[in-house]
Amino acid sequence: MNILNTHLTDGNLCKICNSPFADNYLVKEMMFGFRDQFTYNQCSACNCLQIDKFPDNIDKYYPAYYYSFNADTAPLKRQPFFKRLIANIRIKKLLNDNRPVLRYLKPIKPKFSDRILEIGCGKGKQICDLFNLGFENIEGVDKFIPKEIDHGFGVKILKKDIKDLTPNSYDLIIMNHVLEHMPQQQDVLRGCLKLLRDNGCLMIAIPIIAEAFNIYKENWVQLDAPRHFFLHTVKSMKILAEQTGFEIRSKLFDSLSFQFTASELYKRDIELFPESNERCAYPFEKYFSKEEIENYQKQAIKLNSEENGDTAVFYLYKSNL
Ligand SMILES: [Zn+2]
């Protein structure tokens, strides 16, 4: 093999903006405590962090008790007729509710009749919750579930690739902490662009490189090696959106005390979910006082207000309209 050609492969450049890397970090798997190490490279231009090699044994790092597959779904209950009649009044009230899922929907001004798709939804916990609030035209897709799930009332979780869904048919596509797990970032966003109706919104919640990364570096919990392949900055998200036919119209920072509590544990070489903790309950009360946790939460709120929290929601719309 020609060494020069090998050196010039894309593998040495940022998969978002094609610039050379500036730094690299050796990151341990700490959620379950395997402690296997993975190299992450950071781009010199857009600052996106990305795993050096996609692991070929990734299944090992999603044990059966992993939370997204254990999330129980609520049974579906259709809103009664009179409530559906006053849908316009109800939705305004609902969107002022501070529950996360509703807070995230507020900037979109959705209607109950909107056709909604959630990508990478597992068993569909959030889909069932949204249905029970009144969003009845909703479905999910997850190619990693064992088989298709029918929750009733036409609400299905399809076991499909997004390429196999009907183009131009959704008003809202939700990707809730899934983009960072996907190797082909541009392909996914281009796929979403095809699926969306013209004025539709693609809502992407992801971890973001911000203050928590500056503090904790390789112990930052959201690196989540090797499950997270890409850790974006606001800049790299903007580049990715523009490359794939989108513009970001707004964003919302929603980080929590978790960025401090969990990263502190990783720094002390303590895993979050050893096998003995098969319900995947966060162990923070064991390690932090109530006051410490409250302080971390206050810091998170402050960072969010400065657009420097470590998780954010981006609202993408087609840019050619
Ligand atoms: Zn880059």
Image (spheres, grey):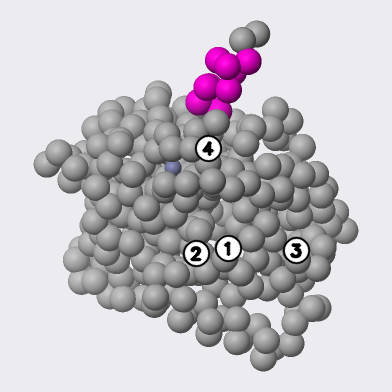
Asked if disc 2 is less than 8 Å from ligand 1, the answer is no
Estimate the x, y position of residue 159 in percent, counting from the top left.
52, 30
Query: Looking at the picture, which amino acid does disc 1 mark?
Result: Phe
Query: Looking at the picture, which amino acid does disc 3 mark?
Result: Tyr
Residue under label 2: 210
What SS does tag 2 mark? loop
Binning the other alpha carbons within 10 Å of mark 4 as few (below 14), some (14 to 19) or many (20 upward) gives some
Estimate the x, y position of residue 143 in percent, counting from the top left.
54, 31
Residue under label 1: 213
Query: Looking at the picture, which amino acid does disc 4 mark?
Result: Met
In the rendered image, residue 82 lying in the magenta stretch gets the answer no
Residue 72, compared with residue 7, is above or below; it is below
Residue 304 visible somewhere in the drawing: yes
Residue under label 4: 182
For the point 60% across and 81% down, the residue is 296
- Foreground label between 3 and 1: 1
Magenta span = 3-11
Tell me the distance, in whole angstroms, between the alpha carbons under discs 1 and 4: 21 Å
Residue under label 3: 266
**Left or right, 79 with reference to 76:** left
What SS does tag 4 mark? loop
Tell me the distance, in whole angstroms, between the alpha carbons under discs 1 and 2: 6 Å
Q: CB of mark 1 within 8 Å of CB of mark 4?
A: no
For the point 49% across and 64% down, the residue is 210
For the point 77% across and 44% down, the residue is 37
Asked if disc 4 is less than 8 Å from ligand 1, the answer is no
What SS does tag 1 mark? helix
Instruction: Please state which of residues 27 and 200 is positioned toward the viewer in this rendering.
Output: 27
